[in-house]
Image: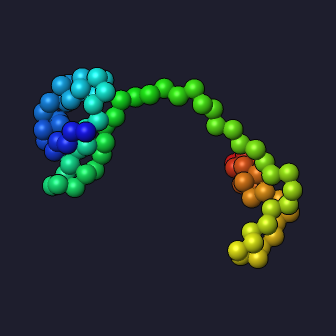
């Protein structure tokens, strides 16, 4: 992993991106504080799947019981906008 400051990254962005394409990871620093990491792009074939609960939800730590999934409710509300 390579580190560089913002001004050096900006001045040599083409060279730095060629290094990233070749597999290099670059951490961009601002006054010795890491602010970003540039890594090679990796396409993913994984799909996000969401499954709804079959039973009633129970928030045990809070002693709150709900009959309806809050996410489903929010999605329905957003659909009305």
x and y percent of residue 73 in the render? Answer: 77, 55
Q: Nearer the viewer, residue 78 or 2?
A: 2
Where is residue 26 shown, x and y percent of the image?
25, 38
* Location of the N terminus (image quadrant): top left
Examine the rendered structure and indicate whether residue 7 appears above or below residue 15. below
Horizontal and vertical percent for residue 43?
48, 26
Count of numbered circles on the image: 0
- Residue at x 63%, y 32% (from the top left corner): 47
What residue lies at 85% left-to-right and 60% top-to-bottom? 56
Q: Residue at x 27, y 31 (%)?
A: 24
**Residue sitting at 72 percent across and 49 percent down?**
75
Query: From the viewer's perspective, is 60 left or right of 67?
Result: left
On the question of residue 77 being in view, the answer is: no
Left or right for 68, reference 1: right
Q: Is residue 20 above or below residue 72?
A: above
Residue sitting farthest toward the bottom: 63
Residue 58 quadrant: bottom right
Give the quarter of the image for residue 69: bottom right
In the foreground, 81 or 22: 22
Name the colour scheme.
Answer: rainbow
Quarter-wise, where is residue 7 in the image?
A: top left
Residue 52 appearing in the image: yes
Q: Is residue 64 left or right of residue 44?
A: right
Position of residue 76 measured from the top left corner of the image (x, y, whole percent): 76, 49
């Amino acid at each position: 992993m390579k580190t560089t400051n913002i001004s050096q990254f900006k001045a040599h962005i083409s060279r730095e991106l060629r290094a990233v394409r070749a597999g290099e990871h670059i951490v961009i620093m601002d006054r010795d504080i890491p602010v970003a990491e540039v890594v090679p792009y990796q396409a993913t074939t994984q799909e996000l799947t969401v499954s709804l609960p079959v039973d009633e939800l129970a928030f045990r730590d809070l002693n709150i019981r709900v009959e309806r999934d809050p996410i489903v409710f929010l999605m329905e509300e957003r659909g009305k906008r």
